[in-house]
Amino acid sequence: MKFILNTGRTVTQGWHVEHKYHQGYFEETSSCFIHPLDLMDLDLEDGEHVEVVSEWGSVVLRAVSCEDLRKGMIFVPLGPFANHIIPPRTHSTGMPDFKNITVELARTERERLTQWELMEKIGGKRYENQ
Amino acid sequence: MKVTLEVKPRQKPHLPIEAEGILPRTFFEGADSLTVFRGNQEIPIGEIFAVTIEGDAGSVDDVEITILGDSSRIKRIGEYMDGGRIHITGDIGMHCGNFMSAGEIVIDGNADAWLGREMRGGTIRCHGNAGDYCAAGYRGEKRGMRGGTIEVFSDAGDFTAETLAGGTVIIHGNAGDLSGVDMKEGNLTIMGDTSRVCANMLGGTAYVNGTVYDMIPTFRKIGQEKVNGEPYTRFSGDIANRGKGTLFIRNYKYLD
Amino acid sequence: MTELLIRNACVIDPLNDICGEVMDIAVRDGKIVESVGSGAEVIDAGGNLTMPGGIDSHTHICGTKVNFGRYMSPEDMRAGRTARQGHMHSTSGYSVPTTYGTSYRYSAMGYTTALEGAMAPLEARHTHEEFTHTPLQDMMANTLFDGNWPIMQAIHDGDIRRAAAIVGWTLSAVKGFAIKLTNPGGTEAWGWGKDVASIRDPVPHFEVTPAEIIRAMIEANEMLNLPHSVHLHCNCLGKPGNHQCTLETFDLVPNANNKRQSLYATHVQFHSYGGSSWRDICSRSEEICRAINSKPQIVIDMGQVMFGKTTTMTADGPMEFNLYRLYHNKWSNHDVELETGSGIIPVYYSRKNLVNSIMWSIGLELALLTDNPWQCILSTDNPNGAPFVKYPEIIALLMSKRYRNEVFETVHPNTEHNVPLAALDRELTWKDIAIMTRGAPAKALGIVDLGKGHLGEGADADIAIYPININETDPATSAEEVIRAFSQTDYTIKRGRVVCRQGTCMVDGKNTTIWVDPHISENYSMDHDPEFAKNFDRYYTVRMSNYPVQEEYIRRNLCIETEAQL
Amino acid sequence: MKINDVVCPFCGCLCDDLEVTVEDNRIVAVDNGCTLANAKFMSKERLASPIRRTGDGWENISYEEAIQYTVDMLLDADRPLLYGWSGTHGEAQCIGVHVCELVGGIIDSTTSVCHGPSILAIQEVGHPGCTLGQVKNRADVVIYWGCNPLEAHPRHMSRYTTYADGYFLDNAFRERKVIVVDVRETETARVADEFIRIKAGGDYAVLSALRAIVRGKGDVVPGSVAGVSRSQLERIVTLCKDAKFGAVFFGLGLTMTRGKYKNVRNAIELVDELSRHTKFTITPMRGHWNVYGSNEVFTWMTGYPYAIDFCRGIAFYNPGETSAIDLLARKECDACLIIGSDPGAHFPRACVEHLAEIPTVVIDPVPSMTTALADVQIPVAVSGIDADGTAYRMDGVPIRVRKVIEPTLPNDREVLKSIHAKMKEARGQ
């Protein structure tokens, strides 16, 4: 199913700006807020996993029911999960399309990667906190 | 005079080369000490190109420069060009033909963003696609391209002909979003589709042969009119900006 | 101990009554002294014109609104770019250059001291930060009090002493130098999108008139014993017929100080218009100058307009909005809570435009019709009338009737019917120019005693040596020579060091910030005034304790402590 | 010990009324702050020493080694990018510009991924703005467009708008109308007097329609624009025109959606148009603490607010070409120094991939997503907690932030100063 993806700040994401090792950061930024009726259409329960695919890649997120959104629109808090599929194209303005991106959603049984696994996938190395 | 510049392989092929010295006048006047920038290193042109010069020139218009090889990261070719000819056989980097006032640039491949920025005169033909801000202006400057002709035979990117203030722009394929935005004078023709064309326009004329998506809602519909025998809807605007521009559009859809 | 000896200097030093005498100047540790030892470094001035370093007593070069002028104008920035070289940082910009660009260009022209024309107290820290990065000039900041709520309330209550106490507290807190009034009352009215129409038009809600604010501030200024007088940008700037407002304003001014003027009226060109609309606007410079000539208590600066591109910026928000409606160019505005406003728009002054041509004429007329050059200082209200790099051209216009005529030929043909300029034959002398760019600004600002604006013993060794021999050059017939000479010194010397040599800056430099700290009795101290503190924390969005500018921002500074009669 | 009137180092509101309790040089309590402020002050996740990536992990190194690595990296690069700056104070930003100028690099701040488009718009049409106190004391109409202060600037509404009583409004909550424009019905939208929900990507069209209606040309506007009925638009215009003082605040809903800066330009031109009828102002909701300070500092130092390219000695500015995202996505830079930001978390993957490929040094107090991509990280004191300096609020008001505890690590300006000094030495200056 096609959706419009918006990303943005949330208080919880903001709280974790300096706490990126916390489980809370992982939970918040790997959440995909979605209208309850869309959840039904996708045959998903609140908290189940969903694969979000853009022209730039795909990422597994946890679906979270949310009535603030219109049907057909999802919201993912700013962070490495959303950015995994955000196109780097800026239309030569310097600013990528962090909002208003067309994506495909489908139910998945796959687990989410952690934010660190995402970084390591592209050649990074997690710093182990002592 | 025939100048051939063949791009040599580079260690860091993605680093842009800034080469505003490459234009007919430089070679007409003698390009022995011509340098270009590779990042923050100023280097002789010979490090980037194999240079061959054949024959003489009686005037700048007798100079033809041909660029061979991968020139997709070479910026500012033909900046301030005032005569002669540049033929680019592949793709070309940003800012090709900035401030050009006379002569001709032909690009066989694609052009990156800001093709013909603030152009004053002359002709640019691009046979591939043009990037964003084709025929546009500079940040903060009220007026963009003021004269000359830019013709793109495939598609053009977003903000095509932004702040156009004179001259002619023809896109044979589709143009991206907000083409002709803040246009002031001049002519813009798009043979394919575009979106939100001529938003906030003050003056000038634009034709769209295909469909305009998300048509700006503040243009006044004047009526149906035939142009070269084809039916168009004529609009005037942008009313939001006290504009007096004219649009001829084949098909359009509002975001309602 | 460092010593310097300048030989064969043809000195004009009006404050010491020296005019064209060829002499040596001795410098020790940054000060002018009677003589130096044989080991001193020697500079041969070659008989060239040597003057105290230039002082700009009204310029906009540092602070929030200046920076916004840069911020919004990348097209202006690309007009004047230089790369980093030697001691010089890279620079950008033409009408609003970067701080380094400003500092280097002023220094190349022999300027060593400047007064920033308008600083909103709430944003003072910003001005001081930019001062730090304007390394080759000593700096002062005019502090804006045109729409200050507690002051207007005090004036409304008839309590001028309280108004003075608030001024004093604020100047100390923000490390300001003088009282600036920009369209007094008008900037507060602009908080509602309105303006005041005359000096008798009350400010909405506060019910005080501009005239009351001006008079109260002149009185407060003297109570605080400030070195400078009130520095006024009159109401109704740029409006046809505004000379009436200006004349009425001048009539308010008592002769309250025997050392200097009681009112400094800035960029008076913009306030000397006759007519009733843009169609019949004309010069009223003659009436304005008649008033100035009869009132020694007033000093003005010209606010000369020169043709070309520039950026206008002033705390006068409503005026800028009017300009925006006229030009429909980009417009910025920035109102500052409880204090003042500001506006910015880029403009192009065209010689083909009648109004612009009249403005150009008026500025020159003011300088030519003011009998006493000590009362009329050279300025463009940089960058409002023109960027300061145009000063040399203005000097040439004032010194040569022939050059004036040549330029007059190129302006709008109807100009002559609207201005008296063509009939003015006066040609200013070298001494007049020295007064208008050195002596008079130093005296008007009250910084002569600090060693500014002259070359007497004990003065700061701020010296400009221009590549021109005044005995061999007739300025009346050599405008080009004059322009060339004033555009670039041979040597600019600051605090006894050569800081600029033929346009190249030789040192990193470090400026001094000059500020005032009036001592006020406990009874009038705002630090212990519960009413003031309560309202401060209630209506400002910054806590009173976070408001004062800390010492960190004025690393090298010169504090003028005054004893207030409070 | 209780310290009063402490300035918050988190968002662009720069609230300066926090009360911090310190015991044994540790912060034990923060009062008056929002939850974001608390998280920042109470954070205990700082790095204690510089670290360097080894083949399969990380090792601690000395400051001297870390600084030398940075110097060598910058001097070796042909086109280094110096990115971040919003988390640090102005004095450090100034040195950053000097460093950039000296190596011939590109300096950009997080502006380019937040309100860069707002700056591009301001450069086209200017900016009718004001300090936040003007809004607090006067505004009877407040519009939040494409922003969600309750999540991103939690105290904005209580300090400056909805709940902030001012001189001319005794009871702000009753006397002030709040309008929210968004594609989502956010928490902020729910407390508004009027909520305009527009279709994604429809901001530009709605703004144009409003401008036409303000001009009295509403007849050209179709019955519905991007999901908003013309009658609602007309009602909004009436509300605005009747206001004594209107204030628009806008956020990333305008800058990040298609059209980018042209959306913002349209919003500014709406405010220009309304200014012909009454008092109206507009203010971008600057997010990351001192991001506006980076624009101010860069502007007076270089002439441009962000995305400045010094590769050729003179400053060149062209966001879209000289901005961090474009440089990284196009692989146009060959080394990166990151300070006071976390592009690893906040940049699109393609950009982050290039960061992982090129030598990268991070100057930051805490380990972040970017740490994983870096070769070296240099921990520093936190501006506003154990480092002092200048920060600029979203409306341009400069405030000095203080130290509330004594530092055990060097601060940003000290680290940058030694980098600068070592570079000058290497260049023989």
Image (cartoon, helix red, strand yellow):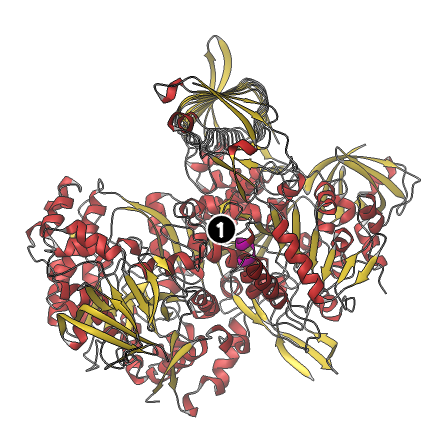
Q: Residue at coordinates 19% horizontally, 68% vertically from top-left?
A: C9
Number of numbered labels in the structure image: 1
Q: Is residue C32 left or right of residue D91?
A: left
Residue at x 71% of width, y 43% of height:
D354
User: Label 1, on which residue?
Assistant: D304
Which residue of the protein is positioned furthest toward the front in this rendering? C38
Measured from the top left, where is residue C222 in percent x and y?
28, 82
Seen from the viewer's position, the closer of residues A20 and D16 is A20
Q: Is residue C274 visible?
A: no
Nearer to me, B34 or C210: B34
Magenta segment boundaries in residue numbering: D98-102
| Horizontal and vertical percent position of residue C458 | 27, 82
Percent x, y of residue D131: 50, 62
Image quadrant holding the C terminus of chain C, namely bottom left
| Main SS, magenta residues | helix
Q: Is D258 on the left or on the right of A79, as rendered?
A: left
Residue A16, relative to residue B26: is it above or below?
below
Q: Of all residues shown, which one is farthest toward the right?
A: A109
Q: Chain of mark 1?
A: D
Please tell me whether mark 1 sits on a helix, a strand or a loop: loop
- Is there any visible trace of residue A74 in the rendered image? yes
> Is residue B178 inside the magenta stretch?
no
Q: Label 1 amino acid?
A: Tyr
Residue B187, image x, y percentages: 43, 23
Residue C290 position (above or below residue D314): below
Looking at this view, is C463 or D25 the one in front?
Answer: C463
Quadrant in the picture for the N terminus of chain C: bottom left
Between C163 and A121, the residue placed more toward the observer is A121
Above-or-below relation of C501 to C557:
above
